Amino acid sequence: MIASQTAFLYLYKMKQLSKFSAALILLLFLASCSSDDGADKDEEKPTITINYDDGFPQACEALKRGETYNFRALVTDNQALASYSLNIHNNFDHHTHDDQEGDCSLEPVKEPVNPLLVVDNYAIDGAPDSYEINIAITIPNDVDTGDYHCAYSVTDETGWQSRTSVDIKIVD
Amino acid sequence: MLKKTLSVWLWLSLCTIAFAQESFNIEGTVLDASSLHPVEGATIYGKDIFSISSRTGAFTLENLTPGTYALTVSSMGYASEEINIAVKPEMQKLTIYLKESATHLEEVEICGKTQLRENKEKPIVAVAVSEVFLKANRENSLMQTLGKIPGVSTVNIGSGQSKPVIRGLGFNRVAVVQNGIKHEAQQWGSDHGLEIDQYGIENIQIIKGPASLVYGSDAIAGVVDIQPNNTPELHSFKGEVNLLGESNNDLFGISTGIEARKHHWYYRGRLTYRDYADYKVPTDKITYENYIFDLHDNNLRNTAGEEANASFSLGYEKDNIQSETTFSNVYAKNGFFANAHGLEVIVSDIDYDSSSRDIDLPFHKVNHFKITNNTSIESGKHTFLFDLGFQNNQREEHSEPTPHGYMPKPDSTKERIFNKNTYALNVRDAFSPNDKHNMVFGVNLEYQDNNIGGWGFLIPEYNRFTVGGFAFDTYQVNPDFHILAGLRYDYGVTETKAYYDWFQTPRNNPDGTTSYIYMQRAENKTLDFGSFSASAGLSYIHNHTTYKLNVGKSFRMPLANELASDGVNYHMYRYEKGNLDLDPESSYQLDIDIDHTTEAFSVGVSPFVNYFENFIYLNPTSNYYETLQIYEYTQSQVFRVGGEVRASTTLFNNLHLDASAEYVYSRQTSGPKEGFTIPFSPPLVGLVSARYQFKNLLFFDKPQFIAEYKIAAAQDEIVPPEEVTDGYQVFNLSYLSEIDLFNNDLPVELRIKLNNVFNTKYFDHTSFYRLIDVPEAGRNLSLSITLPF
């Protein structure tokens, strides 16, 4: 900051321009020193987890065809939750993995014939700061069995997003 | 008011002069009085004696008998100087300082050449970057090199690719101009480089402020103007080979250039090849969201790449005509970090760790072919300039095909292909009716044709035509006081073309049935835009101080992706939506620059205030489209204030100290992200460097040791989806020297650099990989040797 002080000294030698530029520089340094004018800004992401007793599915969970399951995840935000999504797709080519602890053993790579695909978005009404996602899904009898990937995501009203995912299997 | 301009200093030379019996030599160096850079091609003549200064400014007058000689030293752009010198035994070396001449520079300005004096007189806040600076500071990419200039930073991806950011704005808000033609590559995205060969560039001018007046759309935040190289000297031939090696990414680079001139005709050529492996980061694991990626041997997997460039130009200069045609081709292929394709975490069977040099999927390759012609014709008080350009930019992004949503697994790796042709014509008339006025009238025309391919859709095919006309006048109140005012109008038409998915998506009908349709992502649409730009400023030189003030209004036409995107960006793992209602961005800016430079020290300050009426940015909404977050192009008002301060001094003759700081404060003052900053806001950064010039040692001439210390504050001004970035400090060292290996006045230049000396793990807020928590490159030792011939 020695540089800026020296710059100031020289500025004062100026007549016409000096007031204006000094004011500008002052503004510049004031701006650089103040770090708080975002007190009312929402700078927090929402949270999302399946790691609680009712969270579903858990890592490596095997889902039976024909059964109905309640997919449940807990989401919170410091201000207002807005939307969430659930995506279930096959991982027959092993292209992805989850963010849960431990690896599930994957079955051999194979081509999908009639894989299960869930691509659902939902709005959360009332802008709550916590919410439990609870989606009932019946696994059709005719879908391919094997490795699947289940991904949740949630946004808040500001546009922050959080995601979590889990590897599951569909079995007979 | 100027006293006798010549200063001749006799000083103790570092080498002694060789002389033969009875006859003596005058040895000396010609330097620019302000910058202390060597003046090449200066003529030194007296009665029956003549010499021309070399590249290093050195000259020798041989076989002189003792006595007093009257010498005249002159060089284009400088005031000629006369000196008297007594030739006697044991003479010391001469150093001659030439001062730039104001009168001559008016002509130089017309030729588009850079001179310090011209820059001082221009009200526009600009920084001239010399070849000397580029050589001393060369980093892995041209833009990283320029990042050392206060107010200039970069958006990086990987080790070799970066884009310029001026005062926190980059991408399409900074126009990169080469040989007078706007470089049309893939500047809109954060994951591609600049596609310009960084070798063989002599002069760059950086404008840190709105410059639409002259440069048109895109120059809303600034310009990086890579200017044509100086015409080679008459009847000359010279060339160089540069070899570069780097330890961090095992880079090997070679670049060789030649230039020659007969009388009227001249040519230049350059070939460059660089090949590098994955770069190393000072961490063994990357934590992104809840994922942990272990790194093999600290290598950021699959970030290897290669680059091959060639250029050739042919020029003709006679009387009032100068014309040069340049052909260039830049090819690059780079891998992307393999564990995350952009933001999506992926798993692959590819054995990335088997070699750090191979480039596996995902990768991109790009080829940029360019032909430019620059012609100037002087005719009386007019100088006509014609810049003609054709550019073909072909970019391919390849990734492992994976199904996504309703899209089945694609059958090739070609995710996205862009093929863009750009034709440009600039015509200018620089007219000086008298000594006071310097008027420029110009027209810019550009036509662009963008075609797409691949299985991913992001931006539609489009054609774009823009035409702009401008006029400005630089009025010289007196030789130290200049005023500039100008006006411009642009008109543009963008025609986007329809695009339908290649796969079907199920849609539920009201009657309960489901139909399968090819979704339309873009429509045939014709949009037109018009916008005024204006600029007014003054520059006042008072002794050693230069004052500049500039106000300007600039604009930028919305891009096709901003207008008409409608698809999944697999790379960023989000759904991007354009907005056909976008207006051209307009920005108002006030710039001030005060510079005080004496021989002992220099200080400068350049503050600015800026207001965007309608800043376009990609706003993350809280909604989803097929489980991907929707990002929508939105406009808001933005207020920015900031600037740079700089100071430098020379102590004890040999120690040169530089210090600078830069800061930008940005706020969106309307729209859905009101109160937030804008994306990629750089933090407060300070840079201190010390350069010490040693005495010649062994075979090292002019050895210099440079220590550089960069301090960046934390950046907690963020906007979704960014994360707060901690402050950091990095320490770099370099050693530069010349070696007179062949005793022929063509010294070999040696450069050894040690970047990130302490292997510090830090994050750069404006790096693309910051989003997935990848730190910047670790310690890097580089060795560069330039062999002239």
Image: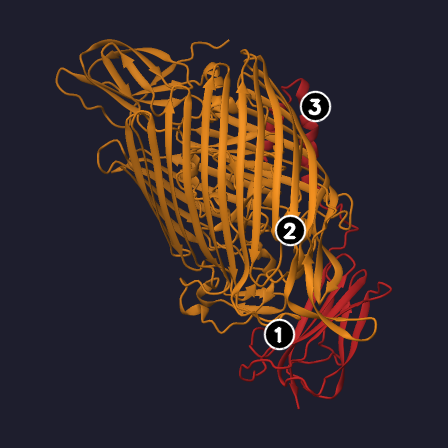
Name the disc covering residue A19, or none: 3
Please say if B383 is above or below A101.
above
Q: Is residue A166 left or right of residue B251?
A: right
Q: Chain of mark 2?
A: B
Chain in orange colour: B
Q: Nearer the viewer, mark 1 or mark 2?
A: 2
Q: Is residue B22 left or right of residue B572?
A: left
Local secondary structure at mark 3: helix
Observer-nearest of A31 and B446:
B446
Can residue B597 be seen? no
Place of residue A48 in the rendered image (x, y in percent of width and height, measured from the top left): 73, 69
Q: Is residue B439 left or right of residue B695?
A: right
Q: Amino acid at mark 2?
A: Asn
Can residue B118 be seen? yes
Q: Which residue, given by chain and number where applicable, does mark 2 sit on?
A: B561
Please say if B457 is above or below B208.
below
Name the disc covering residue A98, or none: 1
Please say if B695 is above or below B49.
below
Place of residue B46 in the rendered image (x, y in percent of width and height, measured from the top left): 27, 11
Chain in red colour: A
**Disc 2 and disc 3 on one polypeptide chain:** no
Observer-nearest of B330 and B283:
B330
Local secondary structure at mark 2: helix
Marks 2 and 3, how far apart at CA = 44 Å
Place of residue B657 in the rendered image (x, y in percent of width and height, measured from the top left): 47, 34
The scheme the figure's colours follow is by chain
Q: Chain of mark 3?
A: A
Name the disc covering residue A143, or none: none
Local secondary structure at mark 1: loop
